Amino acid sequence: MADWAWDESLYSGSAAHYARGRVAYPAALADAIAGVLRLDGSGRLLDVGCGPGSLTLLLAPHFEEAVGLDADPDMLAEAARLAAAEGITTTRWVHEKAEDLPAGLGAFRLVTFAQSFHWLDRPRVAAAVRGMLAPGGACVHVHATTHRGTTAESAPPHDQITDLVREYLGETRRAGRGTLPEGTPGGETEIYRGAGFAGPERIEVPGPVVVRDIDDVVAAVFSLSSSAPHLFGDRLGAFESELRGLLAAASPSGKFREQMREFAIDVWRT
């Protein structure tokens, strides 16, 4: 990512698709985090790169206040809508880049990153987050793939979907106004340890088996930065039409069933 820079179009047009197209984090994930950290309803949560609040809202009942931070205002608007729909009143949504932390937000019992850390200036953000933790606080990194599961007989035709995206957008992965020919970086262990964290303690939660319809799968495709709606320009309608045709041909019933990958939770402590 040396030559790539974040820009505000990264997930442009994806917010509503994200909320529908990504498989929800299971309750067992929140239970696992609450158990290992002995959460009791006290303290504050900061979810960095919260998107539409997928993890924020799941963990909110375990805290006095849950703060979701994201640089995309549409994601935050969707998060606020979902919080209201679920009757969750202890959340706060902050439009800010993670690189601007601590941003006067105060101290937190838990800071989380779920499918967001790789987009950030990781050493800078990890160091800032460590300084924001209350005594005894922790940072949790959730490794997850929620837009697709493992290949199975009745799963969506993921390889064909990838090929169709490439037909429209080219072979090189798109990301906002730039490209990521080698994908997003790994190596977060060294980043966290370099910031002074100890660990990690890993917890694994099995992925569920889910049944999804064509609308869900289409939303999952548009939820990705590499196939966000804005990237297709005036060809968006043609792409969606071909995508729906591909899915209908793969499943005349319009239903797909697939096993989601497991969730891995890394707990980092100060």
Image (tube, rainbow, N blue to C red):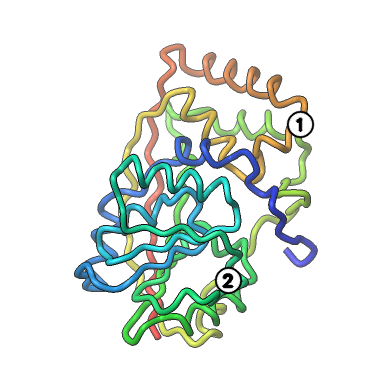
Q: Residues within 10 Å of mark 2 (few under 14, many from 20)?
A: few
Residue at 56% x, 78% y is 191
- The mark total stands at 2
Callout 2 amino acid: Gly
Q: Quadrant of the N terminus?
A: bottom right
Spot occupied by residue 117 in the image (x, y as percentages of width and height)? 55, 64
- Vertical order, 133 against 20 (above or below): below
- Image check: 3 left or right of 56? right
The label on residue 183 is: none
In-front residue for pair 257/99: 99
Residue that label 1 marks: 233
Callout 1 amino acid: Gly
- Vertical order, 19 against 130 (above or below): above
- Image check: 142 left or right of 227? left
Residue that label 2 marks: 187
**Mark closest to the chain's N terminus, 1 or 2:** 2
Residue at 66% x, 35% y is 229
Spot occupied by residue 183 in the image (x, y as percentages of width and height)? 67, 55
Spot occupied by residue 27 in the image (x, y as percentages of width and height)? 26, 51
Q: Quadrant of the C terminus?
A: bottom left
Give the mark toward the camera: 1 or 2.
1
Residue 231 falls in which quadrant of the image? top right
Secondary structure found at label 1:
helix
Residue at 76% x, 67% y is 2
In-front residue for pair 100/89: 89
- Image check: 230 left or right of 203? right
Spot occupied by residue 138 in the image (x, y as percentages of width and height)? 37, 77
Q: Residues within 10 Å of mark 1 (few under 14, many from 20)?
A: few
Evaluate if marks 1 and 2 touch, with contact meaning CB atoms under 8 Å apart: no
Residue 172 falls in which quadrant of the image? top right
